[in-house]
Image (cartoon, grey):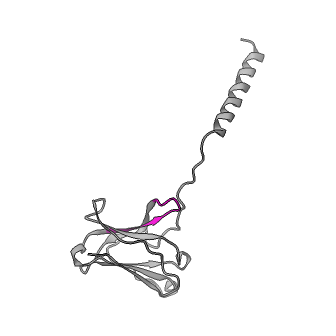
């Protein structure tokens, strides 16, 4: 095979690869949310310093029958898919409640939902209705699980 033929094959291969890449469908990935103030799951609500107190709160009231179970927050994208939120995860207290702080930069976002599992990584036992985050500082959005 001579040099001219080799370069022709290389050029044809590059052209073929370029044309094939045009036919690959492009899909948008899930929209990322900003990191949460608690990167490690905790079992108790955060104590927010006064300088950060301008945020709001979300509270799950699941009832004593769910006390000690694992809970986490999910958010929904435009294609109706749910994604777990890092940081808003932990066990329900003895009364079946958990409260999380919401950063002012996240105010009004949604929809979100609470998921309760029998343990970390376990089976889902309850899911709340969808809700939005607080819209103004100091607001507390309370979500109650229906018995």
Residue 86 in the magenta stretch? The answer is: no
> Residue at coordinates 64% horizontally, 38% vertically from top-left?
21
Query: Vertical placement of 118 versus 25: above or below?
Result: below
At 21% from the left and 75% from the top, the residue drawn is 65
Which residue of the protein is positioned furthest toward the right in this rendering? 4
Specify the farthest residue to the top: 1
Is-magenta flag for residue 76? yes
Could you tell me which residue is drawn at 27 percent across and 60 percent down? 123
Which residue is rendered at x = 71% and y = 21% of the image? 9
Compared with 105, 10 (above or below) is above
Residue 79, position as x, y percentages in the image: 51, 59
- The location of residue 128, given as percent across then percent down, is 36, 71
Q: Residue 98, located in which quarter of the rendered image?
A: bottom left
Which segment is the magenta one?
71-81
Quarter of the image with the N terminus is top right
For residue 140, what is the image quadrant? Answer: bottom left
């Amino acid at each position: 095979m001579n040099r001219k033929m080799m370069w022709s094959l290389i050029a044809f291969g590059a052209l073929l690869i370029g044309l094939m890449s045009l036919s690959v469908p492009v899909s948008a990935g899930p929209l990322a949310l900003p990191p949460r103030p608690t990167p490690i799951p905790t079992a108790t609500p955060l104590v927010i310093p006064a300088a950060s107190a301008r945020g709001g709160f979300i509270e799950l009231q699941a009832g004593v029958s769910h006390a000690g179970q694992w809970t986490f927050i999910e958010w929904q994208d435009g294609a109706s898919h749910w994604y777990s939120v890092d940081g808003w995860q932990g066990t329900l207290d003895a009364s079946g409640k958990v409260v999380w702080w919401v950063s002012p930069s996240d105010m009004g976002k949604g929809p979100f939902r609470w998921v309760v599992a029998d343990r970390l990584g376990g089976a889902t036992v309850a899911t709340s209705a969808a809700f939005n985050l607080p819209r103004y500082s100091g607001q507390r959005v309370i979500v109650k699980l229906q018995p």
